[in-house]
Amino acid sequence: MFVRPGVTIFPLPIEGELHKGDNVAEKIFDACTARELELLDGDVVVVTHKIVSKAEGRTAQMDQGDYARREALIAGEGATILRRRNDMVITRTRHGFVCASAGIDASNVKPGTVTLLPLDPDRSARSIRSRLKRLSGVDVSVIISDTFGRAWRVGQTNVAIGVAGMLATINYKDTADSFGMVLKVTNIAVADEIAGAAELVMGKSEGIPVAIVRGAMVAKGKGKARDLVRPAQDDLFL
């Protein structure tokens, strides 16, 4: 458990491997029950896309080092190749996300298998949220996360690729800071911040695909992860 003043993050292991047709929300609720962790109104449930993709059948066969197969999968994902250097391919996915290899990932899956991004992560998040509400009787927000690299920065961090029940950003434009200065462009990517914070307890190899974030500053609403995608015409670097 990771704790900061006002914010608590609970790791939530899920028993067993998920397969196509499994209900992610029910798995989360059962895991909460087993650990005697009660969901509360206002909690944010952060779910790694891996278990969502597995449950939705968004997997494919690909042997390590099979670059021809990877190219075929990238093309099948409707991705636009933005940059290429040796084996590294940076793409813009059908969702608008800029990431490596259209989000195709061979980690935390059986050898010879890769996961693909959910077709509509926002819809997946809404479905999980709706089912959790029916199971628990409380109103939570849901973030589906993935690990992306970042332009101009070394290392990777979790970001939100699906959002439900909360606004993805908090816009401080035209509000005053502590010195009375009126802010003009400050728009905080709170869904990305919460996804990154959840990664502190989820890790990459600990088998913890879910985290419950309690006490985070969120604004309820019909937000979506696509709100975090900068329109191509506004991108100065691509």
Image (tube, grey):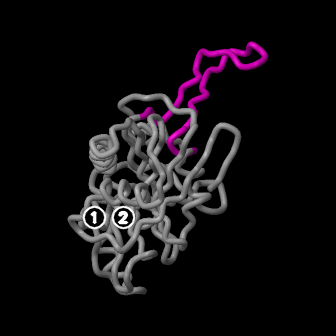
Reply above or below: 57 against 139.
below
Binning the other alpha carbons within 10 Å of mark 2 as few (below 14), some (14 to 19) or many (20 upward) gives many
Indicate whether residue 111 is drawn in magenta. Answer: no
Q: What element carries label 1?
A: helix
Residue occupying the point 43% across, 55% down: 32
Location of residue 140 in the rendering, given as x and y in whole percent from the top left corner: 41, 39
Residue occupying the point 50% across, 33% down: 169
| Residue with the mark numbered 1 | 55
Residue type marked 1:
Ala
Instruction: Name, please, the residue furthest toward the right.
Output: 179
Residue occupying the point 51% across, 60% down: 147
The reply to whether dot 1 and dot 2 touch (C-beta < 8 Å) is yes
Location of residue 110 in the rendering, given as x and y in whole percent from the top left corner: 37, 82
Binning the other alpha carbons within 10 Å of mark 1 as few (below 14), some (14 to 19) or many (20 upward) gives some
The quadrant the N terminus occupies is: bottom right
Q: What element carries label 2?
A: helix
Identify the mark at residue 18; answer none if there is no mark: none
Residue occupying the point 65% across, 20% down: 183
| Residue with the mark numbered 2 | 51
Q: Disc 1 and disc 2: Cα gap in Å?
A: 6 Å
* Most common secondary structure along the magenta stretch: loop
Magenta range? 166-193
User: Is 22 positioned to the left or the right of 1 in the image?
Assistant: left
